[in-house]
Image (cartoon, rainbow, N blue to C red):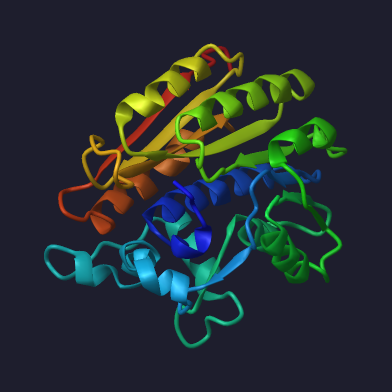
Amino acid sequence: MNYRHAYHAGNFADVLKHTVQLALIEAMQAKPTPFAFIDTHAGSGCYALDSAEAGKTGEYKDGISRLLFPDLHASNGKAAPLPPLLRRWLDSIIKLPGNEHGLKLYPGSPLQAARAMREGDSAQLCELHPEEAVRLRELFHHDNRVHVHQRNGYEALKALLPPKEKRGLVLIDPPYEAQEAEYRVIEQTLKLALERWPTGVYAIWYPIKLRSQVQPFHRWLQRCGARRVLRAELLVRSDDSPLRLNGTGMVVLNAPWKLDEVLREPLRAMTTLLSQDRPAQWRLDWLVEDTAS
């Protein structure tokens, strides 16, 4: 995909990914003990929506902008109120310094996580691209909770797991430049990570172009050994073309209790607000469900 996030920040895939991320962080905060947030592909942390890159694609207009102006996309001209989780997520974007006079900046996963974290929580951010890593360090130079590593995020997990907090969230959000081969790297990374830290929560974002490209990964997840694996997907087009991003998904290993209930209404709202050429579709189901818990 040759995916540089500056071109895609705030698109419909980000809406799903970052809503799930917020739900996971809020689940972590249900307990008073600190947690760790680990991002294997952190990017530069924040993106200007008036940049040349964002302007070239305009993808945020079919993503977060639709949540800002929901009535424009309601069939009767009056959209239903956003579900609370989606509302909290959108408010966190609007309140970002720099967005006082309209949506100018879109925070990436690490900045959204840091803004939601508590004083005792920590973040380990991995970014291999030199320029992106420099911008990431500049963004967090004042925040002693956040540690930036310019290295391969997959390899870094060997050293970062388990975190000293013994509880936390790993976000794996690669650019999928290797196409289908990326899934095999993720599988090997998760296999080793689960051996080192079997109780960690792992959230993996993936693009949907052709359904056949994703199915082997889902089958692997069903036998990966995690006690619970939740799948959340949003499709804005038919999943039958390798030439475009038709949908997006998140799978969560060791998903927190009732995460499916937390995400159901936000996903339903996304299908209404983010539909494009055809009505959007959503999926929320368990690939692995621990009935004993």
The structure residue drawn at horizontal position 37% and vertical position 27%, both measured from the top left corner, is 213
Say whether residue 69 is visible. Answer: yes
The residue lying toward the viewer, choosing from 175 and 69, is 175
Say whether residue 254 is visible. Answer: no
Q: How many marks?
A: 0
The structure residue drawn at horizontal position 84% and vertical position 54%, both measured from the top left corner, is 120
Report the side of 198 relative to 277 (left or right): right
Image quadrant in which you'd find residue 38: top right
The structure residue drawn at horizontal position 59% and vertical position 17%, both measured from the top left corner, is 227
Report the side of 184 relative to 246 (left or right): right
The structure residue drawn at horizontal position 48% and vertical position 48%, both measured from the top left corner, is 17
Q: Where residue 292 sits: x, y (%)? A: 57, 12
Pick out the residue farthest to the left: 76
Does residue 160 lie above or below 87 as drawn? above
Q: Quadrant of the C terminus?
A: top right
Image quadrant in which you'd find residue 83: bottom left
Pick out the residue farthest to the bottom: 101
The residue lying toward the viewer, choosing from 139 and 51, is 51
Report the side of 41 relative to 247 (left or right): right
Does residue 18 lie above or below 203 as drawn? below
Q: Where residue 11 sits: x, y (%)? A: 40, 59
The residue lying toward the viewer, choosing from 81 and 77, is 77
Q: Where residue 16 sits: x, y (%)? A: 43, 49
Q: Where residue 51 sits: x, y (%)? A: 48, 77
